[in-house]
Image (cartoon, helix red, strand yellow):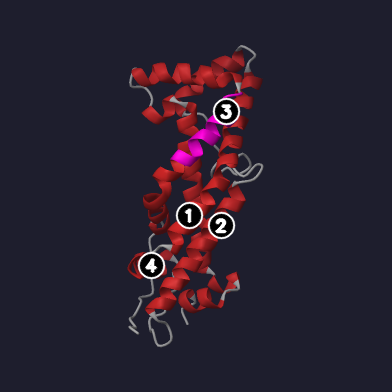
Amino acid sequence: MKRREFTVLAASGLLIPTSWAAISETDAASGIRAALERGAESAVAMLGRNDGFMGNPLVRIELPERLKSAVKLLKATGQGRKVDELLLAMNRAAEAAVPAAKPLLVKAVRDISVEDALKLVRGGNDKAVTDFFAGKTREPLGKQFLPIVTQATEKVALADKYNAVAGKAASLGLMKGEEANIQQYVTARALDGLFLMIGEEERKIRQDPIGTGSALLKKVFGGR
């Protein structure tokens, strides 16, 4: 069985053993899979619940900046409650969609090759996990999320008005394409939030593998 050396990537917070006296490539790959799966499951559990998005300022979905002036006008004309209802519906839609991500994320982790796992260990940058999951799952997850988000937002009165106003703004080049449709916008922001929290969870595991209670993660990431 091959054995190689890892370097210590202190700047990124990774504590990777410099000697592979007791760590094989198989152990390293298994450790990465365990870390990724744990991070994905934790992120899904955190976001896929009531106030998972709405109550978390890191991922809370707000209206696009380009619509802030329209929001001010609505509030000035006594429609502030409708705006609040729309914001709540957007975040509730994301919370409802996230649980659907778990099977696909777990499959992506379990299908990872030893070579790709080692690249993630050595990569050491804050976007390694996010880029991995986004590359493997963002497009299919978007297709899964969209109908869930659509069902959750179509009942809100301002959803159609949002699409009408945003559509005109997009046709004038004032808004990005995905922002012109509330369902696509919420789906994109839900995916951004999911990948962000997966990265946060994975970084915690790398920085404190002992705290996970996993002997394998401690062995691979413990630095000793």
The mark that comes first in sequence, 2 or 1, is 2
Name the secondary structure under disc 2.
helix
Residue sitting at 60 percent across and 46 percent down?
48
Q: State the mark number for residue 117.
A: 4
Residue kind at label 2, given as amino acid type:
Glu
Residue kind at label 1, given as amino acid type:
Leu
Q: State the mark number for residue 51.
A: none
Q: Position of residue 122 (x, y in %)?
A: 35, 69
At label 2, counting other C-alpha atoms closer than 10 Å, the crowd grade (few under 14, some 14-19, many 20 or more) is: some
The residue pinned by badge 1 equals: 105
C-alpha distance separating marks 2 and 3: 26 Å
C-alpha distance separating marks 3 and 1: 25 Å
- Tell me which segment is drawn in magenta: 143-155
- Which image quarter holds the N terminus? bottom left
The residue pinned by badge 3 equals: 153
C-alpha distance separating marks 3 and 4: 38 Å
C-alpha distance separating marks 2 and 1: 8 Å
At label 3, counting other C-alpha atoms closer than 10 Å, the crowd grade (few under 14, some 14-19, many 20 or more) is: many
Q: Is residue 135 left or right of residue 69?
A: left
Q: Quadrant of residue 80?
A: top right
Residue kind at label 4, given as amino acid type:
Ala
The mark that comes first in sequence, 2 or 3, is 2
